[in-house]
Amino acid sequence: MIVSKDAGAVIRQSVLICMTVAFTSCEGMAQEGSPAPAQANPADTALRAPFRTKYAYFEPASFSELPGWHDDRLGDAWPAFRQSCTALQRKNAWDQPCSRSRRIDGSDERALRIFFEQEFTLYQIYNTDRVPAGVITGYYEPLLNGSRRYGAPYVYPVHAVPDDMLYLDSRTLPTGRNGADIRVRVERREVIPLQPQDLASRVSYKLEIAGIAPDIRTRRLRLRIDGERVVPYFSRQEIESGRMLNASVIVWVDNPATLYSMQIQGSGKVRLPSGEIIRVAYGEQNGHPFSPSLAALPQIVNSKGRRQTIATRGLGPALTQDEDEPAKILEQAMGPSADDDLPVTRGVRKAQRQASSATEVDLMIEALLASGQTKAASQNSPPRIAPALSDGAQNGKPEPHAAQQERRERFEAPPLISAPTASQAPNAGANSDPSYVFFRPIPNNDGGPIGALGVPLTAGRSVAVDPRTTPLGFPVFISTRQSGSALNRLMLAQDTGGAIRGAVRADYFWGFGAKAFVQASRMKEDGRMWLLMPKALKFPAPASTVTVRGIGGPNQEAEPSECVVPDPELCVE
């Protein structure tokens, strides 16, 4: 091949450039007609641009900016991430990360860090006013006393989802009717608006839905039939005043304050007089707005002799370090030192505490949540705790493992019990919150309760979020404080809550047990949040380009998306 002088000069220049620039490929530079260097993908550029939704603003960030990223024990978050994959692995952009995660050793911190940095793009979450700080709170899985049979003191029902509850997708409601009557038909549990031409040929009801709003995730309204009308489902006041529900009772409990607390937490365990446990998870909600009643929450008597409401999930002031009555009661039950690095969940504790039983922890929780029912203690004294044996123990000897397993299997799916025809409970109507939560029985196994994502929650690594701004199942890094110390952790957004609203808003799940209760009741802190998004995910347009051209007019800003990732199961537009 004959090379011209000009071509030779090009070759010599190319060789010099390649020798001078480290790690630069020379391939193809000396031959005319070789492909041009790859250009930046516009999609990649957009991926790293800021974007916003109706409720939040998202700014690109790097993992090196995360406070405590290299100190966090990612192996503790790995089981929660794998749980998210069970729900997300068939969804857009999640199949490859979840598939590759199966080949990662969950005990290899370096491999885990590389995995998250390579598979995800990081965005800091801001409020719509570009403020990065928000509120971080905590919740837990409570324990209640109950019975399968109605009778004092077990007179407060834990209801299953009512059979007569109906659902209406608010997006199907007609627009532009100017207040005209809306007629609907009912098919099974679905309420369907009728078009004017269909009215003569179908049985219809008049729709009256004033005073309620659709669920933020599903856009559904909860309704019922009342004669020739379809109206909002019963409010708490109607339910607790003895209104007959077409709903079974899973179990009866002895305390309305602890029952309300369990409705706020979204799950719980109920211990029967025999020591057996019934476990329940969130089943449904009555569709009324969540307006918490602090007066209806449990209380304790603090060290200064004053009653104090036990509030979690940000519903009231958190317990401070000075108000340490829960810690004192915990010390009475478990000894003088509690291990800060090991959440006490489901009776798990370190080996040196073998003499302390799970029931001692349970009794501590009950004492904290007694709400004036402890007769042995005066109103000006904290509850007293007597020594107790573990569930199923006899004469101080632990129950054999085989017997424990048999007992657990017998009560993994407790039967539902119908309510008596007249069950008007004492103190009905004392709670002003119109919202009401219905439950469903779940197996009482070693896993956490079931969250809104449909997977078991992981103590200390699962978090409840607003699904409009933090998609369910996604990893989210949270920087906050706990008891005066920094708390920087990778969490998994696996639950929601009526009180969890806003862009920078999260609710730590601390687990089950005494320590989880104390951690949740003390947590109400400022915090910042970063969202980890799969790199292949398509999401709303960058903030700088969300515009449309009006006909005959100047550019106008388009209405931003309500959800980061619109999904019929996670967040509906």
Image: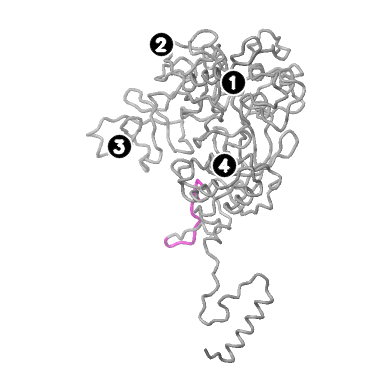
Instruction: Tell me the magenta residue range.
Output: 551-563
Q: Position of residue 480 (x, y in %)?
A: 69, 40
Q: Position of residue 290 (x, y in %)?
A: 53, 29
Is 552 part of what is drawn in magenta? yes
Q: Three-letter amino acid code at disc 4? A: Phe
Upstream in the sequence, badge 4 or badge 3?
A: 4
Q: Tell me which secondary structure the magenta stretch mostly adopts.
A: loop
- For label 4, the residue is 81
Q: Secondary structure at mark 2?
A: loop
- For label 3, the crowd category at 10 Å Cα-Cα, with few meaning under 14, some 14 to 19 and many 20 or more, is some
Q: Position of residue 264 (x, y in %)?
A: 56, 27
Q: How many marks?
A: 4
Q: Three-letter amino acid code at disc 3? A: Leu
- For label 3, the residue is 194
- The residue at 51%/24% (across/down) is 280
The Cα–Cα distance between marks 1 and 3, rounded to whole angstroms, is 46 Å
Q: Three-letter amino acid code at disc 2? A: Thr
- For label 1, the residue is 143
Nearest to the eye among marks 4 and 1: give it: 4
Q: Secondary structure at mark 1?
A: strand
Of the pair 372 and 448, the residue shown nearer to us = 448
Q: Secondary structure at mark 3?
A: loop
The Cα–Cα distance between marks 4 and 1, rounded to whole angstroms, is 27 Å
Q: Three-letter amino acid code at disc 1? A: Leu
- For label 2, the residue is 421
Nearest to the eye among marks 2 and 4: give it: 4
